[in-house]
Structure formats: structure tokens, C-alpha cells
Image (cartoon, rainbow, N blue to C red):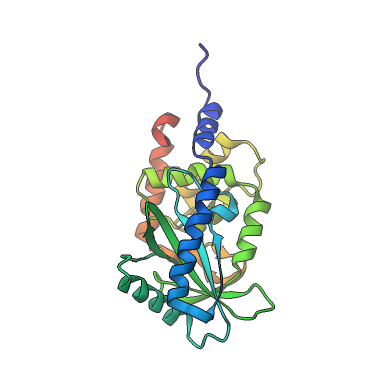
Amino acid sequence: MRSVTASDYLSRILAREVVDRRSATQLDGIARKVELLCTAWGGEHIVEVVPGGGFEKSTANRSGICMDFVVWIRTDAGRRIPEVYESMHATFQRLGLRPIRRDVTIALQVGTIAVDVLPARRLSMISDIHEIYSSRRAQAITTNLHQHVLDSHEANRQDEIRILKLWRDQNGLDFPSFYLELATNAALRRRPVGALVDNVWATLGFLERLLVPRAMLDPANAANIVSDELTAPQKRFIALAAAAARSGRPWSEIVR
């Protein structure tokens, strides 16, 4: 029997972790429940509740699945986004849902499924510019979530991002997904599409050498310094984990 190559090994992991049609059907049912919960909170101020994050970007993994939903708030809702975020958290708490504040979302358990809800206030009904809240930085952020999805598909690095998300989760690293995506795209800017093993290896090298000193900016708003989501010690911890992965370990010990 021939030995399994690194490319075969990572490709099998991607196949195992693919989010298939059954997951999409499950998403529809969860979406209805999340919409009801959000309507109980925001009522007429909600424009719509739509899937977001990894599902829209095709960077979700089955084992680490957390369904992301964006809750669009009307421009004339009359509340600042920090107030919107805290009000939503308080309502979910009153409903006994045990919400958890995350980077820019509120995490819930809906049945057996982990859900991240992102309140976003549109600054204009004729544009895709919106305001979200960073609980880590305790500040409002202006960005374009629609552009983030388009940028992800244009970069075409979903496979590498999915492998690196598994590496992050399996090592218990505090590494926000958007930050991880930006770092991956930066590491692979001039590298060929499809060279999965070499590209993941190169990204780990980038994390080892450049995660700490290099600022990562939101492509939709250069004033939003995404790398500020983590402190220098937190970045160094990720860099050390990347260095450990590149220290001669077989791929079976780097990601499973």
C-alpha cells in the first residue's frame, strides 16, 4: 500500500469537514428560531436576519460548526450600536439563553447548535456600510460585511482557511476568524491557488514570524485595525503555536 501524501491527508480532512446540504437544511430551521428570538428583542427595528460568517464565505467546518447570523437593524432605530449590542445580550439573558459576549457577536446555544448572532446597524438603506460593535475593544466599528464575503471568494483561499481554523480550534487558540482570514490572505498573496500543503505551511510560517509585528487592516475600512482584537501576548502565543507546528512534526500531529 502506498503511503498517504500530505496533500492526500489534508484533502481527506477537508472532505470529512465539508458542510453539506444536510447542514444547509439544518441552517434553515435554526434560522427561523433565531429570527423569532431576535424579533422578540427588536421587533419592528429589525430589517432581516440572514446567514453570515463561514457559511457565506465557504470557510465553515462541520466539526467546529457555529452558525452565524447577521441581524440587520434599521438606520432609524434610535440607539447607538453599543446600546443595541448590550440590549440584545440582556434580552437573551432574560430569556434564559445564557448568551456569551464574543468578538463582535453574541453566542447562544439554540437546541444542540452553537449560534453566533451579529447585530449590525446600516448607516444608510442605500449602501452596504454598517456599524458593528467590538466587545473586545469596547468600540463601534464601521465596515462592510458584504464586501468581506466578496473578498473571501475572490481570494479563493477557503481550503487553507478551513485547515487553519481546525488547527486553531484543536490547539485552543484565541484567534478571531476574520483576523485569521486576513492573515491567511496576506501570507498567500503571491502564492499559487491550489497548492494546499505548501500554502498552509507558508501561512504557519507567516504566523510565526509576522503575526506579532504586522498590523492587519479591514479591507472595507483601513481605520479598523483588526489586529487590535488581540493583545501582543495573545499574538505571541499563536506565533509560538505556529512555530511548534513547523518544528518537524508530521501533519498528523499538526491538524487532525
Determine the residue positioned at 53% across, 62% down.
216
Between 213 and 159, the one nearer to me in the picture: 159
Depicted 75 relative to depicted 135: above or below: below
Q: Residue furthest top?
A: 1
Residue 50, percent from left and from top: 56, 64
Residue name at image x 63 percent, y 65 percent: 146
Tell me: residue 242, above or below residue 100. above
Which of the pair 248/87 is nearer the observer? Answer: 87
* Residue 255 or residue 91, whichever sits in front: 91
Which percent across, then down, holds residue 58? 58, 49
Up/down of 173 relative to 3, above or below: below
- Quarter holding the C terminus? top left
Q: Quadrant of residue 147?
A: bottom right
- In-front residue for pair 54/10: 54
Asked if residue 256 lies left or right of residue 196, the reply is: left
**Residue at the image point whose x is 39% and y is 50% from the top:** 238
Picture residue at 57% right of the left edge, 40% below the top: 199
Does residue 220 appear anywhere in the picture?
Answer: yes
Q: Is residue 179 visible?
A: no
Q: Position of residue 215 (x, y in %)?
A: 51, 62
| Residue 136, position as x, y percentages in the image | 39, 69
The quarter of the picture where residue 47 lies is bottom right
Q: Total number of numbered labels? A: 0
